[in-house]
Structure formats: structure tokens, C-alpha cells
Amino acid sequence: MSLTARDVMDDCFQTLRPEMSIAEAVRIFQRAGRVSGQKVFGIMVTDASRALVGMLSIYDIFLLLGPKHIRSWGEMEDLDVSGLLEAACRRAQAILVGDIMTTEVISITPETHLLLIIDIMIKKHVRRLPVLEGGKIAGIVYISRVFEHILAMLTG
């Protein structure tokens, strides 16, 4: 059996626009999770022509919320951080997706073999890979879907 991205990708997905606020993006994250029945930790960002221009993940949002003057979260143990997170969240609501999204997105094609997908995910530390066909987004491969297929092969 030769599994490819086409076999494991989701072709129903949400996208964001660079000009959306983080507050709008978070609402779409929540809605996407309700629709899919799974937690959504990253969403593709497209321009007006629906071309892939980036990816926004919860890590991008976490980085936005972290205090800029502290190099390591471990250095916060001795600080009074009460109210710090709430203030950061209020400021973050108006920031635009395009300001914090990851722009160097690794993508694959529908014909990319499952072993190569696993290799990319491990080596590049990514949990989702956009699937592009003819320059257009055909779907997205999530690490959880890859794992489901591997489990089926291991137990089947």
C-alpha cells in the first residue's frame, strides 16, 4: 500500500486573511474546532486570490503574548506577573494576522508519499502541512491524521 498526502489530507479547512485581527482569527480557530470536532492549532493564511501566504499557529500567538523584555519564561518566576497576561491579550486583539504569521511555509503535493510527510514533520518540527496542487490549496495534512493511518497499519 502506497499512501500519499491525498489519502490523509483534509480537503475541508478554514483559512485566515493577513488583514484579520488576532481577535477575529481566534474566533475562527474556535469555530473550526467546533466544526471539525477536534482542536485546531494552526490555520493557513491566504491572500485575496486564495494563494497561500502564511500559517498562523497557537505558537505564533503565544510568542505575541510573551513579555518582550524577558529572554526566557523561566526568568519570570520572581516577577509579579498578575495582570500581565490579561494586558497582553487586550493588546494582542488588535494585532493583525499578517504581522505575526509564519511566512516561510513548507508545503507538499497530493502525491507526496506518507514516509516523506513523516520525515518532513519530524525534521522541520511541523504538525501540519498545506497540500498545494497547481499552486492552489487542495487540503492540509495534520500530524494526527498521519498518526491515525500509521496506527491502523500497525494494528491491522
Image (spheres, rainbow, N blue to C red):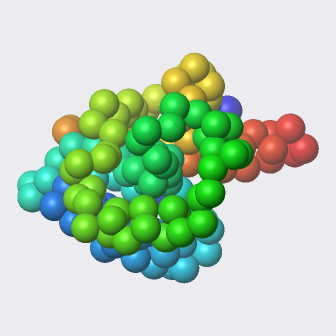
As drawn, is 116 to the left or to the right of 56? Answer: right
Q: Toward which corner of the image does residue 49 lie, by quadrant?
A: bottom left
Query: Which is more toward the observer, 14 or 18?
Result: 18
Residue 123 position (above or below residue 98): above
As drawn, is 136 to the left or to the right of 108? Answer: left
- Residue at the spot 56% in from the left edge and 41% down from the top edge: 127
Q: Is residue 75 visible?
A: yes
List the single residue furthest toward the left: 49
List the single residue furthest toward the right: 155
Q: Is residue 113 visible?
A: no
Query: Which is more toward the observer, 143 or 74?
Result: 74
Q: Quadrant where the N terminus lies? A: top right
Image spot of residue 27 (x, y percent)? 40, 76
Image spot of residue 24 (x, y percent)? 31, 73
Image spot of residue 119 (x, y percent)? 59, 22
Image spot of residue 79 (x, y percent)? 63, 50
Query: Which is more toward the observer, 103 or 73?
Result: 73
As drawn, is 108 to the left or to the right of 154? Answer: left
Q: Toward which corner of the image does residue 109 lie, by quadrant?
A: top left
- Residue at the spot 33% in from the left edge and 65% down from the top edge: 91
Residue 104 position (above or below residue 92): above
Q: Quadrant where the C terminus lies? A: top right
- Residue at the spot 52% in from the left edge and 31% down from the top edge: 71
Q: How many numbered callouts? A: 0
- Residue at the spot 50% in from the left edge and 37% down from the top edge: 70
